[in-house]
Amino acid sequence: MTVVALLSVAPVIEGSMAEEVAKAVEALDDFDVEYETNPMGTVIEADDVGTIFAAAEAAHRAVDGDRVSTVLKIDDKRTSGDSAREKVRSVESVLGRPARSDG
């Protein structure tokens, strides 16, 4: 089984959030997860949903601030072990090209 999640953790502050977001991403290193950060959040992949929840909580707690906004979207595909990369490859196969623009 593979669980894929999209995690977004951000302090509610003025200006750059990069330093605090970096703390959240760094917290993921303490867990048995694979992850990739993009401009909208971080895709996390683990063998079980408990690991995803624990990693998301650690990322949330790593961010300093009076208010922290966290969004977690989970795809718990219980009958398949397809990885996040395999999901993207499937879309690219149908498109016949990479799933991104050249711009």
Image (spheres, rainbow, N blue to C red):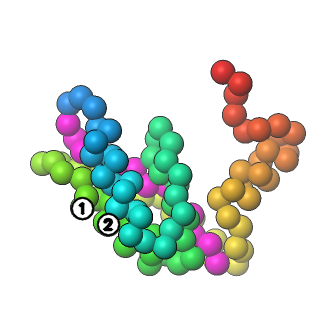
Q: In the image, is residue 4 part of the stretch drawn in magenta? A: yes
- Please tell me whether mark 1 sits on a helix, a strand or a loop: helix
Residue 24, image x and y in percent? 33, 54
Q: Residue furthest left?
A: 66
Residue 71 in view, yes or no: no
Crowdedness of circle 2 by 10 Å Cα count: few (<14), some, many (20+)?
some
Residue 90, image x and y in percent? 79, 53
Residue 74 in view, yes or no: yes
- Say which residue appears at 40% left-offset and 63% top-offset: 28
In the rendered structure, the answer to whether residue 67 lies left or right of residue 25 reads left
Q: In the picture, which quadrant includes the N terminus?
A: bottom right
Residue 17, image x and y in percent? 29, 38
Amino acid type, label 1 = Arg
> Vertically, is 41 above or below 72?
above
- Mark linked to residue 61: 1
To which quarter of the image does residue 2 belong? bottom right
70 or 34: nearer the viewer: 34
- Please tell me whether mark 2 sits on a helix, a strand or a loop: helix
Q: In the picture, which quadrant includes the C terminus?
A: top right
The residues colored magenta run 1-13
26 or 94: nearer the viewer: 26
In the rendered structure, the answer to whether residue 54 lies left or right of residue 102 reads left
Q: Which residue is mark 2?
A: 57
- Say which residue appears at 38% left-offset and 69% top-offset: 30
- Mark linked to residue 74: none
Amino acid type, label 2 = Glu
> Vertically, is 92 above or below 49?
above
Q: Are marks 1 and 2 in contact (CB under 8 Å)?
A: yes
Q: Main secondary structure of the magenta part?
A: strand
Q: In the image, is residue 12 part of the stretch drawn in magenta? A: yes
